[in-house]
Each structure stands twice: as structure tokens, then as C-alpha cells.
């Protein structure tokens, strides 16, 4: 599917579910959606998302509203340990500013078939769910209360 076709599915999902978002198109014709998800359980009750609809796939970058600056080594170890448990997606850590993200890419074939909007709902909520699951461990490290290994145990 083209970037435009993928973006139409994403936009339909956002509008049907009354999500607040901003939409832009980059120089390559890829469509970028930005917004936030609130009402999460756990140490953080909201996250920011950036969804990139491009030709062939849709990517979701979900960002935690916290910085790991000053704890980069510990958070990096924690995210690598947590990532080893995951079947889909990956954690990302920006070493320049401490930004923590969860990222997932879905090939657009996943959206083919019955009810592509419902399939997109899973795609949109998975990163926020993962962030909520591991936020307690991230907070424990940022507050100096746990080692990466012990922080991971808090997330089980």
C-alpha cells in the first residue's frame, strides 16, 4: 500500500475513536501523526506517540515523559533486558537527551483482511501497554531505588 493509503487507515482509526492528533506530510510523502495517550495505569499516566505511515508499513514511536539523563547506563541495561523478553517491538534510548521510546513496525499486510481499524487498535495500544508495564522499573532506576536487574523484577 502507498503511504497515502496507509495514512487513510490510520486517520480513520483516530477519527473513529476520537483521538486528538496532528497530521503532517514530510518531503518524501510519508504521513506523520503525533499525539498522546492518557489514562494509563502505572508510574506514568500518559505517553506521546508519533505514527509514521509510509509505503509498505506503519511505524509507531511511543515516548515516555521522562528523561534517563544521568542514568543512561542503567536504563540502557534495563531496556536491553526488558527487550529480550519481547516478541514484537523494541525499546530505544537516545543517549543525547535521555529520551526513552518503544517502537514497533507493522507491514501494511497486517492491515489487510477484515476490520483493519481493529487491527490498528492493537498496533496503537501495544507500545503504550508495554510502556505502562515497564514504567515502574524505569522509575525505580531513575529514583536510584533499584538496579536494572531488580527493576525488571518489579515489572513482573
Image: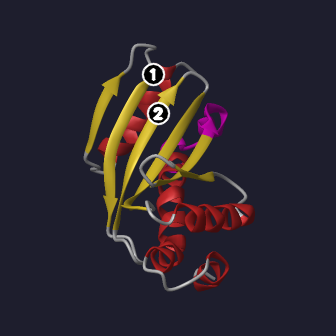
Is residue 52 part of the magenta span, yes or no? no
As drawn, the residue found furthest toward the front would be 70
Instruction: Determine whether 111 is above or below 123 in the image.
Output: above
Q: Is residue 90 rendered to the left or right of residue 26?
A: right
State which quarter of the image contains the C terminus. Answer: bottom right
Depth order, front residue of 62/71: 71
Secondary structure of residue under mark 2: strand
In space, the residues marked 1 and 2 are separated at their CA atoms by 7 Å
Q: Is residue 102 left or right of residue 106?
A: left
Marks 1 and 2 in Cβ contact (< 8 Å) = yes
Label 2 Cα neighbours within 10 Å, binned few <14 / some 14-19 / many ≥20:
many
Q: Which dot marks residue 30?
A: 1
Residue 151 position in % (x across, y down): 59, 80
Query: Which of 101 and 87 lies nearest the eye of the viewer?
Result: 101
Can you say whether 34 is above or below 18 in the image?
Answer: above
Residue 3 badge: none
Instruction: Please give the count of numbered marks on the rendered protein.
Output: 2
x and y percent of residue 89 in the render? Answer: 64, 51
The N terminus is located in which quarter? top right
- Bounds of the magenta span? 106-118
Residue 109, image quadrant = top right
Q: Secondary structure at mark 1?
A: loop
Question: Disc 1 or 2, which lies upstream in sequence?
Answer: 1
- Report x, y in % for residue 7: 43, 29
Q: Which residue is pictured at 64% across the width and 39% down the height?
A: 110
Name the residue tied to disc 2. Answer: 52
Task: Name which residue lies at 45% across and 21% down.
Answer: 30
Q: Is residue 44 above or below residue 63?
A: below
Q: At 61% across and 80% down in the image, what residue appears?
A: 147
Residue plotted at (32% across, 53% down): 36
Amino acid at each position: 500500500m502507498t503511504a497515502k493509503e496507509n495514512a487513510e487507515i490510520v486517520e480513520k482509526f483516530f477519527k473513529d475513536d476520537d483521538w486528538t492528533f496532528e497530521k503532517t506530510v514530510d518531503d518524501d510523502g510519508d504521513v506523520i501523526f503525533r499525539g498522546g495517550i492518557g489514562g494509563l495505569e502505572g508510574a506514568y499516566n500518559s505517553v506521546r506517540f508519533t505514527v509514521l505511515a509510509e509505503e509498505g508499513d506503519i511505524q509507531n514511536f511511543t515516548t515516555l515523559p521522562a528523561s534517563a539523563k544521568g542514568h543512561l547506563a542503567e536504563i540502557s541495561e534495563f531496556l536491553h533486558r526488558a527487550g529480550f523478553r519481547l516478541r514484537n517491538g523494541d525499546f530505544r534510548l537516545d543517549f543525547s537527551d535521555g529520551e526513552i521510546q518503544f517502537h514497533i513496525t507493522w507491514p501494511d499486510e497486517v492491515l489487510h483482511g477484515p476490520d483493519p481499524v481493529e487491527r490498528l487498535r492493537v498496533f496503537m495500544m501495544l507500545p503504550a501497554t508495554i510502556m505502562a508495564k515497564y514504567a515502574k522499573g524505569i522509575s525505580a532506576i531513575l529514583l536510584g531505588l533499584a538496579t536494572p536487574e531488580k527493576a525488571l523484577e518489579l515489572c513482573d
